[in-house]
Amino acid sequence: MQETAFFDCIIFRTESNLYDFNQIEHGGAFIMWMTLGLLGFFGSFLFLVMTIVSVFRKNGQTKKHLTIAVICVIVFLVAAFVDRKPVTTSVTQSQNATSEQTTKDEVESKTKDEVESEAIAEAEAKANGEQEATAKAETEARAKAQTETKKKAEQIPGTIGMTPEQFKTAFNKVAAEYQSDLIINNITITEGVAQNTFQYMFTKNLGIIGTVNKKDGSVREVLLMGAGDGTVKSGADILIGMGILITATNPDLSDIERGNVLRELGVIDGGDIMDLNKSTVRNGIRYKITTSEDLGIWFSAIDANEKE
């Protein structure tokens, strides 16, 4: 009876332990398998001894004891060699799950932060690029405007190809050839904002005004202004002054060509010379006459490229 009770106890413990196997933690599983192993080891040893005793006593328990001993050996072997790798504790699983979730959350958070950072960086780079492009365009526009302004400042508006002193020399030379007393004794340059000027009065009714380029000091325009006082000489001085100005600025013209200039301007065609507004060009010099009862006669020599 004791042997049967012991066997039943082993079977009960084995079944109980197997039933509770999936309900315990990893530490409990380890203790369970170790307990089963010990029970199997000692049980197999005990029942082998009892089997031998039963053989000698011939009490009919030999087969039963041997069966129990074999079962104990099997239990011992199962407990000793069972694969524990798949067994994981709920705590470990929970920790692993928590760790995995934390890692996943960290990765997702990091990825999200990286995406946001990259988006912000791209937006900033784009904004900086636009600002740089705008600044560059503005700088280039300013540089271009400055260059154009400089070029305009450097460009000579117009010139008749001589300095004031050269003009004075040429004018006086022609006047001497014409045996005229319309001589320029001196030229005084007056500084201006956009251009310089000079003027000289031959008589109280006849004089010249000249404009001078600041860039190179060349004469831009010479204007002969006169008004008759009712005498023949005053009228003759105006005509002679126009002839001298044409010859001084265009010395290669012949007498006939100079006469043609005056004819084209309507000065010597017999018409009314007090209502003229004409111009003609010779060798890059434009000659223009404007007359009226109030202003008298204005006769100018200017660069032909200048707008009228």
Image: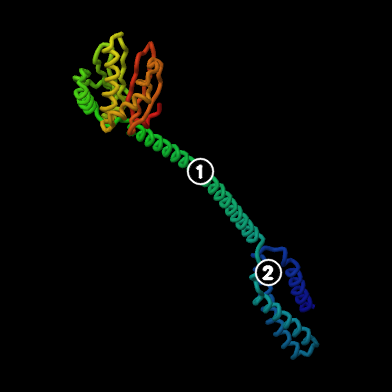
Q: Nearer the viewer, residue 202 or 94?
A: 202
Look at label 1 and name its amino acid: Glu
Disc 1 and disc 2: Cα gap in Å?
64 Å
Quarter of the rendering containing residue 232: top left
Residue 266 numbered tag: none
Q: Is residue 38 among the parts visible in the rendering? A: no
- Kindly give the residue lying farthest to the top in the view shown: 230
| Quarter the C terminus occupies | top left
Above or below 111: residue 62: below
User: In percent of the image, x 62 and y 55: which residue is there?
Assistant: 101
Name the residue at 28% across, 24% down: 245
Residue 223 place in picture, x, y as percent: 31, 21
Q: Residues within 10 Å of mark 1 (few under 14, many from 20)?
A: few
Judge left or right: residue 238 versus residue 269.
Answer: left
Kindly tell me whether residue 43 is visible in this rendering. yes
Q: Residues within 10 Å of mark 2 (few under 14, many from 20)?
A: many
What colour scheme does the image use? rainbow
Image: 175 above or below 82: above
Amino acid under disc 2: Met
Residue 185 falls in image quadrant: top left
- Please give the label number shown on residue 32: 2
Q: Earlier in the sequence, mark 1 or mark 2?
A: 2
Residue at the image position 76 percent from the left and 68 percent from the top: 19
**Image quarter of the N terminus:** bottom right
Residue 96 position in % (x across, y down): 62, 59
In percent of the image, x 26 and y 19: which residue is there? 199
For label 1, the SS is helix
Quadrant in which residue 47 is drawn: bottom right
From the image, state whether disc 1 or disc 2 is nearer to you.
1
**Residue carrying label 1:** 124
